[in-house]
């Protein structure tokens, strides 16, 4: 599939999965393509069907789920105003739409895992609880990011169709392995985009999601028996790297809409 990014980000029309314009190594897999890494892990072929998707609303992605434990709104969500230049707002909208693709991907993945577990009961205890929690959080992130884009005067990108390896709906280990790959990609994307964000309220908002994505990664690593924090510093990823890493899971070409100033 092909992905064309919003203005001021290079196109990926000629890129293959795991590369940017055919030259950039895949940051998520240490130089290997995402599909090659999944094959090494024994995750099996991609499937777009059967459709195990469940409505994100069932995971509690309501206004209540957007509130912090303290009872206040997510930082920046209600306060964001287009106080920067028109070009800065356009760039921020483009960055948020790139993030929205990744949030849609994660939300769809966890929704399908939960639906598959409801049908087959292939998860146990903490694995099942984690899947439901992750599905709820990512569904809320989709709504949060979409609302922020609208507040800035932009149009949220439509959710593309996704495909996933078949084994992630059968094997708890396969589910957790792919989950940590997706979460690490999101963490790196938010960190890498931070210096490019013009609006401080958008930056504050994105940081609040970054923190949750990092917690997700730690939880999944714990369930896998891995180090919760395998390195002292997080590794930033460019928007191009992060979206390229997501490309194998997206079924058809998508065009990232530019914002309006």
Image (cartoon, rainbow, N blue to C red):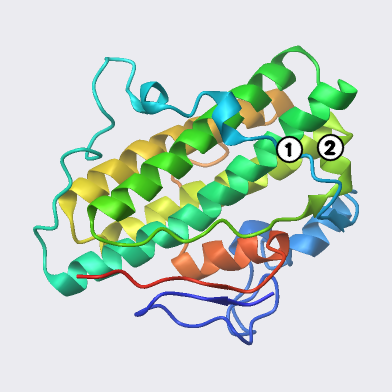
| Quadrant the N terminus occupies | bottom right
Q: Residue at x 30, y 53 (%)?
A: 150
- Dot placed on the residue nearer the N-terminal end, 2 or 1: 1
Residue 79 position, x and y percent, is: 15, 40
Relative placement, left or right, of 167 versus 218 is right
Q: Residue at x 67, y 26 (%)?
A: 131
Foreground: 38 or 50?
A: 50
Q: Which residue is mark 2?
A: 169
Residue 180 position, x and y percent, is: 65, 41
Q: Residues within 10 Å of mark 1 (few under 14, many from 20)?
A: many
Foreground: 57 or 21?
A: 57
Relative placement, left or right, of 205 versus 83 is right
Residue 197 position, x and y percent, is: 25, 60
| Quadrant the C terminus occupies | bottom left
Image quadrant where residue 67 sits = top left
Q: Secondary structure at mark 2?
A: helix
Note whether residue 236 is visible. Answer: no
Foreground: 166 or 239?
A: 166
Image quadrant where residue 238 sits = bottom left
Judged by depth in the image, the label closer to the viewer, 2 or 1, is 1
Q: Which residue is mark 1?
A: 112
């Amino acid at each position: 599939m092909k992905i064309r990014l919003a203005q001021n980000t290079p196109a990926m029309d000629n890129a293959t999965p795991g590369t940017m314009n055919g030259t950039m190594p895949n940051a998520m897999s240490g130089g290997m393509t995402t599909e090659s890494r999944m094959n090494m892990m024994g995750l099996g072929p991609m499937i777009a069907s059967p459709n195990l998707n469940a409505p994100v609303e069932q995971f509690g992605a309501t206004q209540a789920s957007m509130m912090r434990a303290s009872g206040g709104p997510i930082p920046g969500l209600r306060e964001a105003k287009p106080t920067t230049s028109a070009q800065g707002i356009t760039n921020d909208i483009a960055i948020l739409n790139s993030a929205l693709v990744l949030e849609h991907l994660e939300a769809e993945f966890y929704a399908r895992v939960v639906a598959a577990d409801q049908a087959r009961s292939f998860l146990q205890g903490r694995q099942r609880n984690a899947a439901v929690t992750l599905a709820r959080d990512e569904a809320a992130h989709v709504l949060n990011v979409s609302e922020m884009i609208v507040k800035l005067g932009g149009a949220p990108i439509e959710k593309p169709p996704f495909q996933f390896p078949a084994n992630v709906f059968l094997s708890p280990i396969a589910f957790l392995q792919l989950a940590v790959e997706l979460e690490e990609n999101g963490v790196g994307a938010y960190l890498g985009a931070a210096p490019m964000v013009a609006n401080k309220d958008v930056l504050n908002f994105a940081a609040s999601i970054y923190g949750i994505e990092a917690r997700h990664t730690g939880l999944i690593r714990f369930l896998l028996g891995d180090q919760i924090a395998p390195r002292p510093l997080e590794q930033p990823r460019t928007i191009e790297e992060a979206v390229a890493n997501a490309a194998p899971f997206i079924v058809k070409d998508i065009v990232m809409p530019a914002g309006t100033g």
